[in-house]
Amino acid sequence: MVGMNVILFGTTGMVGQGVLRECLLDPDVDSLLSIGRNATGQQHPKLRELVQTDLFDYSGVETQLVGFDACFFCLGVSSAGMAEDQYRRVTYDLTLAAARCLAKLNPNMTFIYVSGMGTDSSGRGRTMWARVKGETENALLQLPFKAAYMFRPGAIVPQHGIKSKTRVYQVFYTLTGPLLPLLYAWFPKYITTTGQVGRAMLKVAKQGWPKTVLETSDINAV
């Protein structure tokens, strides 16, 4: 696909920062619309930002969301300390609000959702976050997009100075930083990088992939 127009959610998060970087470097990406509650502060000829305070309602900005080929949905929160109804609200409800709107406006769009290793597709498991993520994946796969893919990375090595907004994750990355490249080489089934995730998303959006659910080893293989 040449001249691809992309929407990116979660641009300020660790995964989103990596995807943003790869999109801006990719010559096949003509334009990138970042949607979030806060601006990234970055400037680039390809990049346009839409600050949307209510991520559950896009009725007032629908005219700005037409004509896109792909959406990379990297927005997510940790379930730590959250009740299931709260987590469902900011995971299932928030994701589907955006996805349903985009499916209506861009039926030829490829939608890629960043889920996580261990997500429970049955929707009946005992682990709350995995169950909610699984229900979210299943609902996305039912929407009338040209194609939809679920990315389930395990541990992600941040590259190019990217940092995690989740404090406990950043502490982990800081403490284990020198070992992460080695761990990535030793355990390719469980560890990927921010760059790998971004490049894999772009390739899948352009060329498709035989699986709709991609685990870490699939992401690295792409």
Image (tube, rainbow, N blue to C red):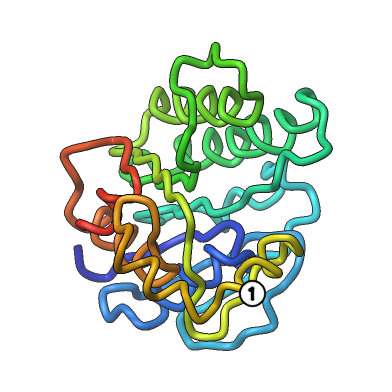
Quarter where residue 41 is shown: bottom right
Residue position for label 1: 175
Give the left or right position of residue 36, taking residue 182 as reference. Answer: right
Q: Which residue lies at the image location 55% right of the left edge and 15% below the top edge?
A: 125
Give the left or right position of residue 212, taking residue 154 as reference. Answer: left
Q: How many residues crowd mark 1 within 10 Å: few (<14), some (14–19), many (20+)? A: few
Whether 26 is drawn above or below 85: the answer is: below
Q: Nearer the viewer, residue 200 or 111?
A: 200
Q: Which of 114 and 43 is in front in this view?
A: 114
Whether 206 is drawn above or below 210: the answer is: below
Q: Which residue lies at the image location 30% right of the left edge and 60% below the top edge?
A: 200
Indicate the position of residue 109 as horizontal and vertical percent values: 35, 46
Instruction: Look at the numbered disc 1 and give the secondary structure of its residue.
Output: helix
Whether 110 is drawn above or below 144: the answer is: below
Indicate the position of residue 20 as horizontal and vertical percent values: 49, 72
Give the left or right position of residue 183, taking residue 61 as reference. Answer: left
Toward the top, the furthest residue is: 124
Q: Which residue lies at the image location 57% right of the left edge and 72% below the top edge?
A: 176
Indicate the position of residue 121 as horizontal and vertical percent values: 44, 22
Indicate the position of residue 2 as horizontal and vertical percent values: 21, 69
Give the left or right position of residue 84, taking residue 105 as reference. Answer: right
Q: How many numbered marks, from 0 up?
A: 1
Q: Which residue lies at the image location 57% right of the left edge and 78% below the top edge?
A: 162
Q: In which quarter of the image is the C terminus?
A: bottom left
Q: Quadrant of the N terminus?
A: bottom left
Q: What residue type is labelled 1?
A: Leu
